[in-house]
């Protein structure tokens, strides 16, 4: 039996990897995947914590997060596709027409 | 769902039904008569405003303490509905002129307003999170609604990526708070801290992550990088709506969550808030000086304004000052909404269809060609600086009073000094308008003119009789505790 705290440590590692990914990677799809990784890290810790506290509300929260993340994916992918059509790249370093 | 649950959420329910029907009805409105959609959206917002105001003075919770109805939520709901109405009036002619007239514009705007209202009513972190997404996702779409214009697309993707990044922090923060206390309800969290069953270290990290997330949403330094780019690339009518709406909603959540659930963490959180607010005031005002584009200048100015509001929020854990500090923040949010909508309205009037007319140099000669517009712009610039006779000055006096009552004199001094710096770039616009000759191209349109005029008049008049509004704000806060 794996102790519950291992899951929480694992989720912290996942969250840090997601944050690093957003900060380091330049492809908007990969950045987007890193953001999803952050959300899933939160999901994992919710489930683990709800095991510790023996309460269901954490598990229900996970469903809400998944639904909202799906809505975000719909908007995000639509945006990325539109950008690819007009620029033929989704590299965020190429997006620098706005500056002052 | 009992009758009480239904009543507490009545504004949200009404507006949701209205927005969904609007999306359907819009299908049958021909392309050349999309003004009708705008009218319907405005009617829905006005109707909800009346419903919300009729709930004034009531106090109730619903859905097992998930949402509340109190003075604080009614105050902010009214403000959000006003922001929605102003968002419709400034957009009406602008999106027609820019060829963006799509029916979904107004439906998305209404959905975003629903999210903001829910944010003010949330008393459980789950609801706060859902409200935050409900307000943000339509804004991501609205930011990119001028596609295939590359600026708008770029603003959309930048706003989306950084907004979801912030959401990631908020969700993980909520997860840690849940882990520390075993509950996500604000009342439950404070009880768990009170009976010392909470894991304080974990709770503090969670609260810190929440602060990072909300810092992104309100555009506080060092989480402000997206603000200038997004404000510049987004169609100006959306920027006006987002500059007021998203910021006020971010502060609504911050005020409620931190004042209600984390007052006992104040000794640890106050230094962080001090740094955030001081940096926002300094960086926002200093970088704004270098801007030549009016939209970017207003973006940096909004960062600085966020700093001033955060400054009042620093003594949130001090029970004696708490009321004063949060009501000052609420008052300033109203002042900021009126002033910024006016300033963005004038930006819209001067913007041309080819995207020109957005340089500060384009304002040269406005004083001679369109004296009334120039007077209105002068009022807004004075108000943003915090000079009499405007609401900006009164709001800042309340903010400074709250900070000093909390004992943070050096922050108040910093606030005054940065206001002095800001006078340089705000008054530069005024000097351009009156002292230099030029040929500004202005689009006059009834609804836009009315909005600008109303904002200018309100900014001046309310500054002479601020007491009723401030009383309302402080009674709203009193109901919070």
Image (spheres, helix red, strand yellow):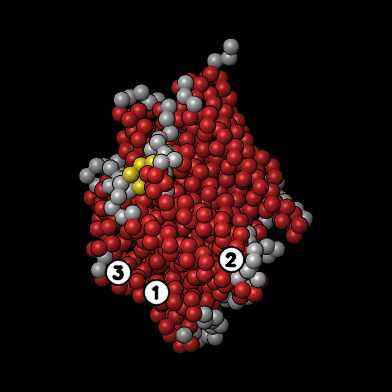
Identify the residue under disc 2.
Answer: B235
Q: Is residue B359 visible?
A: no
> Could you say where residue B77 lies in the image, as x and y percent from the top left?
40, 55
> Could you say where residue B343 lies in the image, as x and y percent from the top left?
45, 70
Mark with earlier residue (2, 3):
2
- The answer as to whether the residues below labels 2 and 3 share one chain is yes
**From the viewer's perspective, is B294 left or right of B10?**
right
Between B63 and B141, the one nearer to me in the picture: B63
The reply to whether dot 2 and dot 3 touch (C-beta < 8 Å) is no
Tell me the distance, in whole angstroms, between the alpha carbons under discs 2 and 3: 30 Å
> Could you say where residue B161 lies in the image, as x and y percent from the top left?
61, 48
Quadrant where the N terminus of chain B sits is: top left
Mark with earlier residue (1, 3):
1
Identify the residue under disc 1.
Answer: B454
Residue found farthest to the front: B3
Name which residue lies at 50% across and 40% down. B170
Name which residue lies at 23% across and 63% down. B467
Identify the residue under disc 3.
Answer: B462
Q: Is residue B382 above or below residue A63?
A: below
């Amino acid at each position: 039996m794996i102790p519950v705290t291992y899951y929480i440590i694992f989720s912290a590692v996942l969250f840090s990897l997601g944050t690093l990914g957003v900060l380091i990677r330049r492809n908007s799809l990969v950045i987007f995947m890193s953001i999803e990784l952050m959300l899933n890290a939160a999901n994992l810790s919710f489930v683990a914590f709800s095991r510790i506290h023996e309460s269901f509300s954490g598990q229900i929260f996970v469903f809400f997060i998944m639904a909202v993340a799906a809505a975000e994916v719909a908007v995000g992918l639509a945006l990325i596709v539109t950008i690819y059509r007009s620029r033929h790249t989704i590299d965020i370093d190429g997006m620098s027409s706005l500056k002052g | 769902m009992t009758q009480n649950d239904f009543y507490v959420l009545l504004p949200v329910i009404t507006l949701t039904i209205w927005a969904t029907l609007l999306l359907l009805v819009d299908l049958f409105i021909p392309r050349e008569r999309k003004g009708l959609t705008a009218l319907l959206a405005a009617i829905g917002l006005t109707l909800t405003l009346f419903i919300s105001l009729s709930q004034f003075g009531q106090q109730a919770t619903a859905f097992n303490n998930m949402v509340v109805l109190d003075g604080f939520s009614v105050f902010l709901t009214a403000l959000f509905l006003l922001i929605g109405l102003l968002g419709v009036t400034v957009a009406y002619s602008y999106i027609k002129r820019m060829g963006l007239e799509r029916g979904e514009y107004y439906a998305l705007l209404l959905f975003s307003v629903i999210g903001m209202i829910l944010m003010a009513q949330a008393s459980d972190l789950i609801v706060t999170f859902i409200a935050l997404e409900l307000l943000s996702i339509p804004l991501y779409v609205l930011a990119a609604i001028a596609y295939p214009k590359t600026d708008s697309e770029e603003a959309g993707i930048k706003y989306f990526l950084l907004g979801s990044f912030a959401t990631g922090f908020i969700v993980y923060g909520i997860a840690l708070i849940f882990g520390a206390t075993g509950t996500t309800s604000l009342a439950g969290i404070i009880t768990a801290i009170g009976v010392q069953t909470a894991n304080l270290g974990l709770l503090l990290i969670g609260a810190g992550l929440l602060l990072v997330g909300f810092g992104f949403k309100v555009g506080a330094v060092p989480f402000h990088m997206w603000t200038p780019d997004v404000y510049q690339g987004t169609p100006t009518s959306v920027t006006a709506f987002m500059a007021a709406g998203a910021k006020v909603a971010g502060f609504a959540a911050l005020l409620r969550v931190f004042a209600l659930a984390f007052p006992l963490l104040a000794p640890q959180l106050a230094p962080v808030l001090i740094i955030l607010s001081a940096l926002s005031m300094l960086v926002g005002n200093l970088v704004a000086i270098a801007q030549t584009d009016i939209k970017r200048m207003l973006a940096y100015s909004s960062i600085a304004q966020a700093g001033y509001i955060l400054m009042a929020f620093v003594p949130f854990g001090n029970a004696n000052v708490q009321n004063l500090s949060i009501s000052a923040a609420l008052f300033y949010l109203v002042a900021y909404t009126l002033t910024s909508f006016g300033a963005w309205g004038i930006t819209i009037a001067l913007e041309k269809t080819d995207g020109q007319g957005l340089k500060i140099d384009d304002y040269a000669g406005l004083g001679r060609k369109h004296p009334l517009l120039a007077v209105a712009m002068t009022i807004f610039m004075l108000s943003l600086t915090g000079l009499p006779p405007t609401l900006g000055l009164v709001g800042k006096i309340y903010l400074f009073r709250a900070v000093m009552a909390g004992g943070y004199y050096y922050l108040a001094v910093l606030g005054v000094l940065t206001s002095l710096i800001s006078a340089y770039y705000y008054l530069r616009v005024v000097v351009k308008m009156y002292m230099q000759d030029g040929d500004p191209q202005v689009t006059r349109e009834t609804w836009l003119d009315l909005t600008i005029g109303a904002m200018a008049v309100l900014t001046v008049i309310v500054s002479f009789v601020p007491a009723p509004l401030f009383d309302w704000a402080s009674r709203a806060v009193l109901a919070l505790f």
